[in-house]
Image: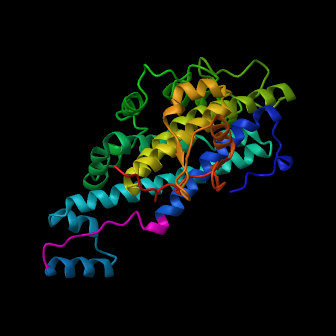
Amino acid sequence: MEIDKKENLKISQEFLPFYDFLNYCRFCFLDMLEYADKKHLSMEAINYKSDADRMASENICKNQKQNLDQWLLDNGYKKVAFNFYFKHLFFSLLVDFCNYYNASLDIASNGNIYVAWSLLRKPLQETLAYIEWLYVDKEELISLMMENQDVSSYEIMNKKNRWKIKKHIQMIQPSISSEKMNIYDFRYSYENPLTLNGILQATNHLITTRPYLKTSPSGLNFVFENYDSIHRNTGFYYTSLSYVMKYAIELVMKIFASIAKLSDYTITVNSLNAMLKAYQALSIPYERAKNLIDLEQMPIYCPACGQANNTNEMWINFAHSYFECNKCHKKINTFQYLFDFEDIIFNR
């Protein structure tokens, strides 16, 4: 995949590393969705207990007025129904996330930073929260969605459910984490203007009166803007979104790999790739990144000739945009989700 030509972008040079990482996340998500469609990952095979059940199921599929999910639940196929619903829900949420995330990136790259910010509310506050819920307790979420007629029971932004968001984030990214950003506070706090809600209040309302987010006297939010304030809010967009997406892509990759049943090596290579590209965007020096990930213990095996590659030059190129085997010189674009290593067979 080709990164947008930099000369066509209205982005300061200092923000380009963040833009590249955010685009890498975009391409990975699209690759996952394309792979899921190609491999029919949303489907779930049904081992029928009898020919009568098979015929009943086929008749329900033909008659769209009937609910196959309910028939599966009522006739002893609950696990099948749950597995299908889980996969279908995950990929549908990922599509929804991409629709808003991709549009936000494109609008930001054209210089309309406040509209770009406004498009992040749904994907970061709601869609990602449901993906987190799926990861932490898919049985709870799917049970509520399939068996409870009250939609408020699984409305994540409902007051009685919002505590779950913080709990899920803490389980995914424990508080002892060395990450600089508190993912929950950035996405949901109203007590700091430098949060998603702080920016959203100003982008969506000309006047705000919350204690920590009050409009300046004689002012209107983001109307009397000058170059410095636009530049500052653009920088905050790219840096803060990169921290969130480092967290989000790791989470999405874990769920995707479990559904696609990818090899451990493919999972590891993609996890390393995401971390390296995030570290590069966040200006973490290569030597420090190398120690954080322990790259010396992780060679990249060429899928063409089997050669193990583990030089500093190879890893730097890998983090930037490509892998090249030092034996057969096969090149692989790393600005994507990497399925290239899936067929490597390791002798035990």
Vertical placement of 57 versus 212: above or below? Answer: below
Could you say where residue 95 lies in the image, as x and y percent from the top left? 53, 56
Vertical placement of 61 versus 186: above or below? Answer: below
Q: Residue at x 13, y 72 (%)?
A: 49
Q: Which residues are magenta?
A: 37-50
Could you say where residue 111 lies in the image, as x and y percent from the top left? 80, 42
Displayed quadrant of residue 108: top right
Displayed quadrant of residue 223: top right
Q: Residue at x 83, y 29 (%)?
A: 224
Which quadrant, please, contains the N terminus? Answer: bottom right
The number of discs equals 0
User: Residue placed farthest to the front in the image?
Assistant: 327
Is-magenta flag for residue 244? no
Q: Is residue 170 left or right of residue 325?
A: left
Vertical placement of 347 versus 161: above or below? Answer: below
Could you say where residue 337 lies in the image, as x and y percent from the top left? 56, 52
Is-magenta flag for residue 43? yes
Q: Nearer the viewer, residue 19 or 304?
A: 304
Q: Residue at x 61, y 35 (%)?
A: 278
Displayed quadrant of residue 273: top right
Q: Nearer the viewer, residue 339 or 10?
A: 339
Q: Would residue 322 be visible to someone looking at this image?
A: yes
Dominant secondary structure (helix, strand or loop) of the stretch shown in magenta: loop
Could you say where residue 87 lies in the image, as x and y percent from the top left? 38, 57
Q: Nearer the viewer, residue 273 or 209?
A: 273
Q: Nearer the viewer, residue 308 or 253?
A: 308
Q: Would residue 63 be visible to someone looking at this image?
A: no
